[in-house]
Image: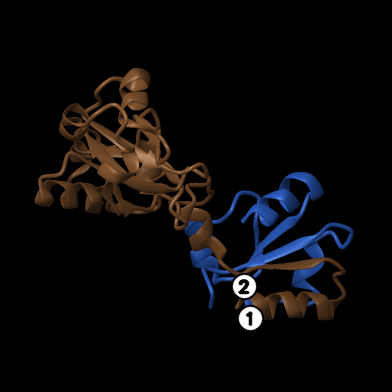
Chain colours: A brown, B blue
Amino acid sequence: MSARAAWRLEAIGFGRVYDYRPGKKDWLANGLPTEGNRSDQKRIGDVARSDFPTCLTTDTVGEVRRRIGLPRQCVVVNEANIVEGRIGRLALTDARDDDPIEELMELGPTTVRPDASIESVARRLVDSHADSILVTTDLGELLGVLTSEDAVPHLGEA
Amino acid sequence: MDEVRHLIALERAQLVEVLPASSYNALHLPGAVSIPLKQLDSETSAILDRDRPVIAYCYDYQ
């Protein structure tokens, strides 16, 4: 649709026309602001925490322990802030200092997009007995973490 | 995405949502105007500045 609109605008005589093909869905999936009647409805991106412990795939266990101690959960990202895995306190406690985080992390954690409804994700957390879920862009870049503590109060919301 | 944000921030690009008005009214990109594709012509597009870039968008790869 936008491609046809772009062609139409050029035919009308506009000199610089661009087609944002991924569209509104892409914009929402990246947690960017919007306007409109529904723009004030809370989305995951509004509630997710950004101050969640993270470490790099290139870190060792010792480096993580020295930097952030023994967090309950730590999100493992690469240099581009793309989510690669998660690692919990038990794994960090039992490992040696020079063990690579990359070899101990849980691969491919479940993620959700920032434009998903809080209610649906809260239900998902409750049903799976999970205490948190990662929020990323559709390219896997970490935006935050939604905890069940923050999500559960929104159960039952439209 | 980056190019779109660059055009908006640095080149004052105008956003045009070409979905039906109901979709625009619910949610649209900040500053976007609504010109549904079925109504897009020289008259309705007259609200746009021809000296600035124009970015057309819909919902996704439709």
Chain hosting mark 1: B
Q: Circle 1 sits on which residue?
A: B38
Q: Mark 2 to mark 1: distance in Å?
A: 5 Å
> In percent of the image, x 53 and y 55: which residue is there?
A27
For residue B30, side relative to residue A108 (left or right): right
Label 2 chain ID: B
Q: Which secondary structure lies at badge 2?
A: loop
According to the picture, the residue beneath numbered tag 2 turns out to be B36
Residue A105, picture quadrant: top left
Q: Is residue A81 left or right of residue A3?
A: left
Q: In the image, is residue A50 above or below residue A6?
A: above
Which residue is at a point 61% across and 56% down the rendered structure image?
B1
Local crowd size for mark 2, using a 10 Å CA cut-off: few (<14), some (14–19), many (≥20): many
Horizontal and vertical percent position of residue A119: 23, 49
Which mark, residue A56?
A: none
Amino acid found under the numbered disc labelled 2: Pro
Q: Residue at x 12, y 46 (%)?
A: A126
